[in-house]
Amino acid sequence: MFIGEYQHHLDQKGRMAIPAKFRKQLQDGIVVTRGIDACLFVFAKAEWDKLAEKMSSLPLTQANSRAFSRLLFAGAHDVELDVQGRILLPDHLRRYAGIGKKAIVAGVFNRLEIWDEAKWKEYQTKTERESEDIAERLMGAGI
């Protein structure tokens, strides 16, 4: 499970270090893609394969299924950790998420999310402000 929040910098080539505590979980392959809320999703290859299997069962005739599949799969890239524990974030994904020099890596259960630092702070402030309402809406889900 991925948990925690870490601040990182991107170099001029768009490489960013993955927190050391997550590297072992990612050593068998990594997929990075567009996420929701203008961030990037980073999956271990095995977790990506599980998601792909679930997505393949969605009905092709539903517009939302097609749109979400395109969001995740069309921009996805296999990436590798280099010897320094960095991954290269493709230009189009950095543009999508608005990631500049400073990024936040957030562990979120079965994936990592990479956010532009300023967008993360904005999102976090909004979510913290609405936390009571969010919790109340989730009560119906058994949480």
Image: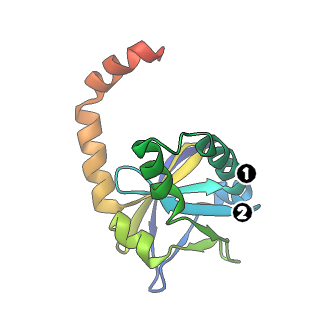
Q: Is residue 59 above or below residue 111?
A: above
Q: Quadrant of the image for the N terminus?
A: top right
Quarter residue 79 falls in:
bottom right
> Residue 84: which quarter of the image?
bottom right
- In the image, residue 55 lies at what x, y percent? 59, 44
| Number of numbered discs | 2
Q: In this view of the protein, which residue sits in the foreground, 84 or 40?
A: 40
**Type of amino acid at the residue the image marks with label 2:** Gly
Q: Counting residues from the N terminus, which is met first, the one under dot 2 or under dot 1?
A: 2
Please determine whether, in this image, residue 137 is positioned above or below residue 43. Answer: above
Secondary structure of residue under mark 1: helix
Residue contact between numbered discs 2 and 1, judged by CB atoms under 8 Å = yes
Q: Residues within 10 Å of mark 1 (few under 14, many from 20)?
A: some
- Residue 74: horizontal and vertical position, in percent? 51, 64
The residue under label 1 is 46
Residue depicted at 58% across the width and 60% down the height: 19
Q: Residue at x 46, y 50 (%)?
A: 66
> In x, y percent, where is residue 63?
40, 45
In this picture, residue 106 sits left or right of residue 131: right
Q: Is residue 136 above or below residue 37?
A: above
Q: Nearer the viewer, residue 79 or 50?
A: 50
Task: Identify the mark at residue 29; answer none if there is no mark.
Answer: 2
**Figure quadrant of residue 20:** bottom right
Question: Relative to 31, does residue 36 appear above or below in the rendering?
Answer: above
In the picture as drawn, the residue positioned furthest to the bottom comes out as: 12
- Image point 25% across, 51% down: which residue? 122
Between marks 2 and 1, how big is the CA–CA gap?
Answer: 8 Å
Q: Is residue 13 left or right of residue 133?
A: right
Instruction: Look at the numbered disc 2 and give the secondary structure of its residue.
Output: loop
Decide if residue 99 is in sight here. Answer: no
